[in-house]
Structure formats: structure tokens, C-alpha cells
Image (cartoon, coloured by chain):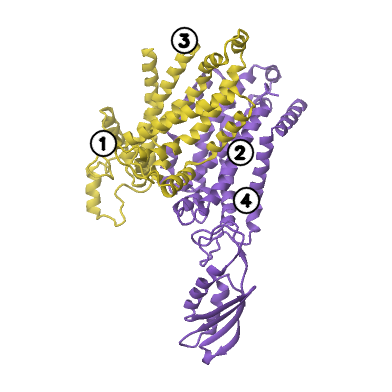
Amino acid sequence: MIGLVLRRLGQGVPTLLAVVAVSFFLMRLAPGGPFDLERPLSPAAMENLRRVYGLDRPLIVQFGSYLAALTRGDLGPSFSFRDMSVAGLIGRGLPVSATLGALALVLSCALGIGLGCVAALRRGGWADRAIGLAAALTLSLPSFVVAPLLQIAFGLTLRWLPLSGWEEGDPRHLILPVVTLALPQVGALARLTRASLGEVLRTQPVRTMRAFGLPPARVARHALRGALLPVVAYLGPLAAALLTGSVVVETIFGLPGIGRYFVEGAVNRDYTLVMGVVLLVAALVIVLNLAADLVCAWLDPRLRTDA
Amino acid sequence: MRGRGANTARTLGRLGRERGGVGALAVLAVIALACLLGSALTGHAPDRFYPDLRQLPAGLAAQPDAAHLTPALERIAFRMRAHVAAADRTGDRLRLTLTSEHSIDRRSLVYLPRSDLFGPATVVVDGEGGRRLVLDMPVRRLHFLLGTDIHGRDLLTRSLVAGRVSLAVGLTATLVALLIGIGYGAVAGYAGGAVDAAMMRVVDALYALPFVFFVILLLVFFRASLVLMLLAIAAVEWLDMARIVRAQTLSLRGRDFVRAARALGQPASRILLRHVVPNTLGPVAVAATLLVPRVILLESFLSFLGLGVQEPQTSWGVLIAEGARAIEAAPHMLAAPAAFLIATLVSLNLLGDALADALDPRAG
């Protein structure tokens, strides 16, 4: 078990290395630099800045020293936020994004899996059709359309909730972003659960259980355990995507999360900040995929031996 | 070959029974046709500005209406260095009285038809040594079914032209992803063994990359452009396709007709093209149908962030971004392109579902 976890984490190292290399050279080969301002700096000042940040050295040397710093857990200083380290910025943004993402994850799981179960158990009925249509609709509603509509409805017209912004410890700022973020995933999870549970309900063991006269609720509970496997596998990458923030949702609602730091960093050519965020996302994807596999192994004993 | 034809016919027959699928297909056909041809029928060029008719709400009434006529006349009169003394509209004709401290330059009358709201003006009365003109001119009747945007451009025309770009991006990127995915998946599945394992390890590793972040990086750092966005989207989306095709190929590889082809000494490339790939197309068609809306969504998401389609070209994402900025003053600017986008995405998703059900051998 522990060996498996360590081996999988070890397999993630080359992936992370590839992420670092691709994003590093992609950014450095692109035109423009972090110190290009509206009014150009004097050549001497530019030279100084580049020397201080080590940008005057050969690219490969810079890459080496970035990697060396990385092994010490040092993500470097930010180029655009003065006197801030990338780790410090991520430390500020991650709690916001993670709170948002975790709430959206819980909401979409509860609603999505619940509705998917109802649809599968009432296959072909009106509830199934309504849920199917609603799922297709939520999947097709882009967050950048939903967000302004919610802002109009609850922020401007009803005045129940703040339009945008973020205040520490005020949960009302989170409601609209969480709903926006969760909505498409409710549809995706409902469809996935319906398909997978529907398949399990048609298998022999379930028919046997029914034949033995088990109450439908208990049959459904047994079936659900198996049906959750593909759902959990889907939740791994989904959790990573939600926890690291949605760029659009954070931009529209003015939340100081990771996604916004990333876009601002990219626009400002803040090399280290962008690298830090990309690295964080990639690491989370790896860890959460592993977690999803472990949960799958717990749900289905057949997966334990060869996992 | 005959077997496959019968299969296709049966699939289409089943699709016909899925009411949702047929409805979705009809909606898609209407939207696609409207985007292709409709922009020529609205009577407005997509880049035609009507500076006097900005942010008109959607409606059937002919423009300029009474509320917009006076400000438009005053603006034109100001450019002619004159004042509007009286404006009298009867039906399609307008009798306009202009006064000025100096004699009014007749050449400046071209400002009237140039606004596209009026026809050429004729002078009826020329009084006070040219300082008082009574003009007669036809008033145009313009229709903006979905209103106009902040620059006074017709939103219906723009939505249709934008749809052309969005649909083209969706289909092209899907096609590219399809070709890469089928090629990669079929080769991996057919080769099997160590080659397959290595190729699929690459796919697994690519899955772990935060691709949306890379796409954003690419577009920010190397100037957003349509081709770059197409390539970036295709590069993200071929992975699923490769997995599906590989799984199908693995199961086809041992089947008798493939083994027979191999025994006949056909080259691997021919076996793949003639025998393997055609038989994977069912699930691939479903995946591709569901991929198109994802690509369109990704395109409009990037365009919304200002990283995708650039002016003067436009797409639904660009229009939605403009609408979201003007949402308090002119909510129709968000509603019109959003309705087109959502109708397209819902139809594509429903069509994909219906196709999947129709291809499911266990159902019906």
C-alpha cells in the first residue's frame, strides 16, 4: 500500500519535470519580458534589473538554478508583485481558491450523484427525462454566461448577495461563485452516475438480489458501491481543477485566487509566478488522481491486486 | 461492406426514434444554415455602424423611431452647423427645417444620407438667403430584431457571423483532434505490447498536464490568433479520442476478419485503414459529437478572456464578453449571443446522447 503510493508519486516526478521544462522554455522563448513597461526603462536600469533577477545568464543556466532552488522548495521571488515570493502569493491565493473549489465540489457531488441515482432508478420515467434535459442544459451553460446572470438576479435586482469581491470570513461572497462553479459539474456527475448505475442495475448480482426479495433501497445501496467507480475516477481530475480555481469565475467575481494570479502573471510576464501556479496544479492533479485510484481500490476489491 | 451499410441504416433508424436526437439535429441545422446564409438576409453588414442607434433593445419596430429621430437629426445638424427648427414626419417622409446664423452649405446635405437613416434630401424652401432651409427626404425603415451593440451594429447579423467562426473553430479543432487521436490510438492498439504500453504512458502523462493553463500561456505569450488557438485546442482534446480508439482496436485486433487480412499478407497500414478504423467509428462518432460542444465552449471561454478570436473577427465568446460588460445598460447584448451559444451546445450534447443510445447494442 505505502509502496504503491510511493511508486505512483515517484512516477509523477518526470511529469512534473516535463511541466517545469515546457512552461519554462515556452515563456522564455516568447517575445517580451517582465520589465517591459509602457515607458521603456533606461538600458542601464534594465541591465541592472536583469542582473539582479539573473535573467542575463544563459537560459540553460537559469533553468538549472531554478530546478536547484525547486529541490529546496523555493519557488523564487515574484517579478511583478514587489517584495513578494511566489510561495507567499500562492499561500495567499490558495486558501481562497481551495475554499471555493471544495464547496463547489461538495455541492456538485451531492446534487449530481443524487440526481443521477434518481434518474437511473426511474429510468425512462418523467424524472429521468427531466434530469437528463437539465443535465444537458447545465453542461451547456458557460460559466461566463451564468455568472453575469446570477449577479444581475441576486446582486442587482434582489440585492441579497454581494456582486463581487472578497472579504475574509464573509461567506456571502462565496455563494454565487460556488454555484457558478458547481453548476456544470452537477450535470456531468448526474449523467455519469446515471449511466454507470444503470449499467450495474442490469448485472446478474443485482437481479439475484432482487429475486431474493431485497428491498429496492438496499439493492440500490449495493449497486451504488460498484457504480461509483467511474464517478470517483472522474472526481480526481475534477477536484484538482476545482481546487485550483476557475480562471473565469475568479475574474468575474473579483476573487483573489490562484486562477487570477495565473492570468495576471501570464500577462505581466511574471515567469516565476506562472511556473509556481502551473507546478501546483500539476502536482495536485497527480496527487488527486492517486487519491481517486486509492478510493476506487477501496470500493472494488478486484482493483487492489494489480493497482 | 453490406453489413456495415445495414448497421448504419439501423443506427439512423434508431436515431430517428430518439425524439430528442431528431429535434437537436433540426435545431443544429437551422442554426448552421442561419449562420452560413442568414447574415446576408438581415439587411445589415456585420461591421456597419449606426452611431445614432446604439444599444437598441431587441424588437420588431422599425428604426429610427421617434425617440431616436430627434437626437440623430440634432447630431447631423450640428455637423452642418445648423439647428433643427422643426421636424415633421409623415409616414416615410420627413420635412426638416434647419436654421443657422450663416448660410447653410448645400454640400453638407450629404451628411443626411451618410447616416444611413435618411435618403437623399431635396430642398423645398430656401429662405433668408440660405440661412433657413426646408428639406424633404425619405426616412429609412431599419429593423434590428435582436437590437444593436454599443457601437450601433446589428446584433443579429453579428451573432450569425460570430456563429460562423465559432462553428468553424469547433468543427475544425474536433477534426484535427479526431485525426490525431484515431491515428495514435489505432497504431498503439494494433501494435500492442511494449509499443502500446509506452504510447499509452505518454497519454497518461499528458493527462496530468494542466493543459488549459498551457493554452492560456501559449496564447498570452505568442499573440492570440485563430490558427494558434485551433492547434492548441486540438492538442488538448485528442487524448480522449486516442484512448477510445485504442480500446476498440485492442478488441478488434484478435477478431477473425483482421487475422484473415493479416494471413492474406496485407500490410499493417492497409489493415488499419480498411478493417480496424472503420469499425471503431461508432464510439468515435459519439465522442466527436460530444467533443464539438466542448471545443466551442473552450473557444468562447478563451475569446471571453480576450485570448481567442480577435477584432475585427468575432465569435460568440467575444460577443458574450461585450454583453457581460454592458449587462446593466443593455442585457440583450448578453442574451442574444448567449442564446445562440447555449442552443448550439444543448443540441450537440443531446445529439451525442441520442447517438450513444442508438449505438448501444443493449438498448432497444
Give me the chain letter of mark 4: B
Task: Let me know if marks 2 and 3 both belong to one chain.
Answer: no
In the rendered structure, which amino acid carries the disc numbered 4? Cys
Residue placed furthest toward the bottom: B129
Same chain letter for marks 2 and 4: yes
From mark 2 to mark 3, how far is it between C-alphas?
40 Å
The residue labelled by disc 1 is A88
For the residues bearing labels 1 and 2, Cβ distance under 8 angstroms: no
Q: Which mark is residue B35?
A: 4
Front: mark 3 or 4: 4
* Residue nearer the viewer, B258 or A73: A73
Chain for colour yellow? A
User: Which numbered dot is residue A270?
Assistant: none
Separation of residues labelled 3 and 1 (CA atoms): 42 Å
Where disc 3 sits, the SS reads loop
Left or right of A284 on screen, residue B116 = right
- Specify whether disc 4 shares its chain with disc 1: no
Q: Residue at x 40, y 19 (%)?
A: A8
Indicate the chain coloured purple by its letter: B
Dot 2 corresponds to which residue? B348
Whichever of callouts 2 and 4 sits on the residue coming sooner in the sequence is 4
Q: Quadrant of the C terminus of chain B?
A: top right
Left or right: where A285 falls relative to A205? left
- Residue A100: image x %, image y %? 38, 35
In the rendered image, residues at marks 3 and 1 fall on the same chain: yes
In the picture shown, does residue B353 fall above or below A207?
below
Residue under the point 36% across and 13% down? A2
Q: Disc number at residue A305?
A: 3
